[in-house]
Image (cartoon, rainbow, N blue to C red):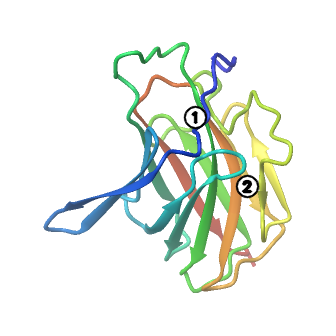
Amino acid sequence: MRSLWMIWTMGSVLAVTMIFTHSAAQEQKKWTVGPYSFSDEMGGFSIRSISGTGTTEDPIVITEELNDIVPVTLVIRNSSVGKPGFVPQGFGLLFHLQIRAINGSGRPWQEFFFELQSLLGEPSDYSDGLSFCQPCDVTGMIHSNLFAAYDDDFEPYDRMLFHDGKVDPKANVSMDFPIGDFTPKRIFYLVQEPRIPST
């Protein structure tokens, strides 16, 4: 359910680490901040760097490059799930995220879309405990350097659309927002889609 049980914000002492896994196909990177790790393993984009601790003053900043105008999926894992002391119905994490997206598509972006998914391919709904911090007062938490406005669709989905702006090729845009994770799941997903003018 969406009610707040307990929010644990990540302190400034948490470090960002990288774990490199080599395979015959490609080198995959898992970037870790506190109990969370972030991965571009599903392809279509590349994470360039991660910094920050997840607080309001020091959000987790994920710099990534998108080379096309198709949806891509950021894989997010919570290593706390299943460990001793983890209580699914009474445990929650709130972290602040900044996506810094480099436009490598060669075409200007007019909008940028996000969707949270607790199950891959299925939009997050009201009852799964995952949201852009729906129970919170998000005043001032959601903003962008190049998009002047955003629309949210928190019922029955968890979606946001940044708009009223333009991101030229090779430029980068930053978009800040909180994520509330009150689920017992080890893994969830953030779908991202840059959009071009329709005409």
Report the residue that reaches farthest toward the left: 24
The spot of residue 14 in percent (x, y) is 50, 45
Residue at disc 2, secondary structure: strand
Residue lying at 59% horizontally and 69% vertically, measured from the top left: 101
In the rendered image, the vertical position of residue 137 relative to residue 96, given as above or below: above
Residue lying at 70% horizontally and 55% vertically, measured from the top left: 176
What amino acid does circle 2 point to? Leu
Give residue 53's mark: none
Q: Is residue 104 left or right of residue 111?
A: left
Q: CA distance from mark 1 to mark 2?
A: 15 Å
Q: State which tag comes first along the sequence, 1 or 2.
A: 1
- Mark 1 = which residue? 124
In which quadrant of the rendered view does residue 77 lie? top left
Q: 65 or 123: which is nearer to us?
A: 65
The spot of residue 15 in percent (x, y) is 46, 50
In the rendered image, the vertical position of residue 75 relative to residue 82, given as above or below: below
Instruction: Give the crowd class for mark 2: few <14, some 14-19, many >=20 residues within 10 Å.
Output: some
Report the residue that reaches farthest toward the front: 13
Residue lying at 57% horizontally and 55% vertically, measured from the top left: 52
Residue lying at 82% horizontally and 34% vertically, measured from the top left: 137
| Quarter of the image that includes the N terminus | top right
Instruction: Give the crowd class for mark 1: few <14, some 14-19, many >=20 residues within 10 Å.
Output: many
Q: Is residue 12 left or right of residue 56?
A: left
What amino acid does circle 1 point to? Ser
| Quarter of the image that includes the C terminus | bottom right
Residue at disc 1, secondary structure: loop
Q: Is residue 20 left or right of residue 181?
A: left
Q: 117 or 97: which is nearer to us?
A: 97
Give residue 161's mark: 2
The spot of residue 174 in percent (x, y) is 68, 66
